[in-house]
Image (cartoon, helix red, strand yellow):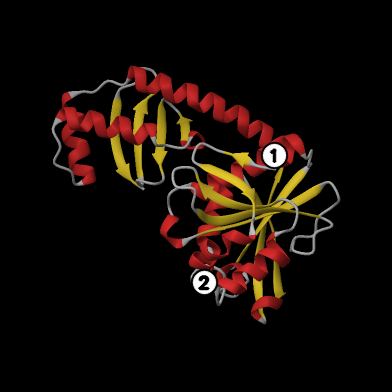
Amino acid sequence: MELQTKRLILRPWQESDAEALYKYAGNPNIGPIAGWPPHTSVENSREIIKSVLSAPESYAVVLKTTGEVVGSVGIMAARSETHTARIADYECEIGYWIGEPYWGQGLIPEAVNELLRYAFEELRMAAVWCGYYDGNEKSKRVQAKCGFTYSHTEYDKPVPLMNDIRTEHYTKLTQEEWRNNQIHKGIGNSLKEAILERLCYTESVYGRINRKLGLHLLPQEIESFVSDIIKGADEMHILKEGKNYYITNDKESVRITVNSFTYRVITADRV
């Protein structure tokens, strides 16, 4: 089984991936926060491929542009020995990690969203779980971006591979919630396009945006900047409150305010 996204191929692990796996899994910033120790050698990575990553629905994350293996994602069903959530037969858990050089590029949310599609549409799961240990803010953000909502927290949870005890937070996404999110994304895309087509500006807003964001841009550059912020905003972060749209681009930490009747750009703020 092979899955694909715009930038990624998700395919079964192969023993020949051992060197690429060790390149990133040997980093102490990767495994310990997820509950497993850094790999110690290429041979250690090869053994883990054979003993752990060869499990059903375990995928290497491969960049389409280079063919390089840069991370791992997987689906753990109730019968799996590697899941940590208490799940029913018609539910599963998703796990993931990616090499440190690729943090902040949206690759893991892209991979997780494809796993969610596969889990709900093809495996017919009723719900998907995810977890993160206390302090793992990156993993928490991935789950929020993919539509998971907080379920519960378990304390004093053994982490056998690290020989310690931790607090683990669990999130959950049901099939109904996922389908509603897909509908919302479609609406969000259409709305984003409509806003971009109708954007207009007053003379005063150019100076206001420069002052509030500490920029020194010409009017034409401001217009290009605002359009780029809106284009890069997640569909889930286009909110209508009262007479305005509030469009937040998390990656750039900027929110654009647009009048919902005239589509006039009102201001921009750091968030």
Front-most of 102 and 153? 102
Front-lying residue, 115 or 174? 115
Label 2 Cα crowd, 10 Å radius (few <14 / some 14-19 / many 20+)? some
In this rendering, would 194 be left or right of 143?
left
Name the kind of residue labelled 1 in the image.
Answer: Tyr
Can residue 63 be seen in the rendering of this structure? yes
Is residue 153 visible from the viewing direction of this image? Answer: no
**Residue 265 relative to residue 204: left or right:** right
Compared with 231, 80 (above or below) is below
Where, by quadrant of the figure, is residue 268 drawn? top left
Residue 138 horizontal side relative to residue 55, left or right = left
Residue drawn 31% across the image and 29% down it: 227
Residue 118 circle label: 1
Residue 130: image quadrant is bottom right
Q: Which residue of the protein is positioned furthest toward the bottom in this rendering?
A: 163
Image x and y of residue 134, in percent: 59, 68
Q: Provide residue 183's location: percent of width, then percent of height.
A: 62, 27
Element type where label 1 sits in the image: helix
Q: Nearer the viewer, residue 89 or 122?
A: 122
> Would you name the residue on which mark 2 appears?
26
Identify the residue shown where x is 48% and y is 66%. 23
Q: Which quarter of the picture shows residue 25?
A: bottom right
Residue 129, compared with residue 249, is above or below; it is: below
Q: Amino acid at mark 2?
A: Gly
Tell me the residue at 43%/49% (across/down). Answer: 105
Q: Position of residue 100 (x, y in %)?
A: 45, 62
Asked if residue 35 lies left or right of residue 68, the reply is: right
Name the residue at 64% across, 78% down: 162
Discs 1/2, front:
2
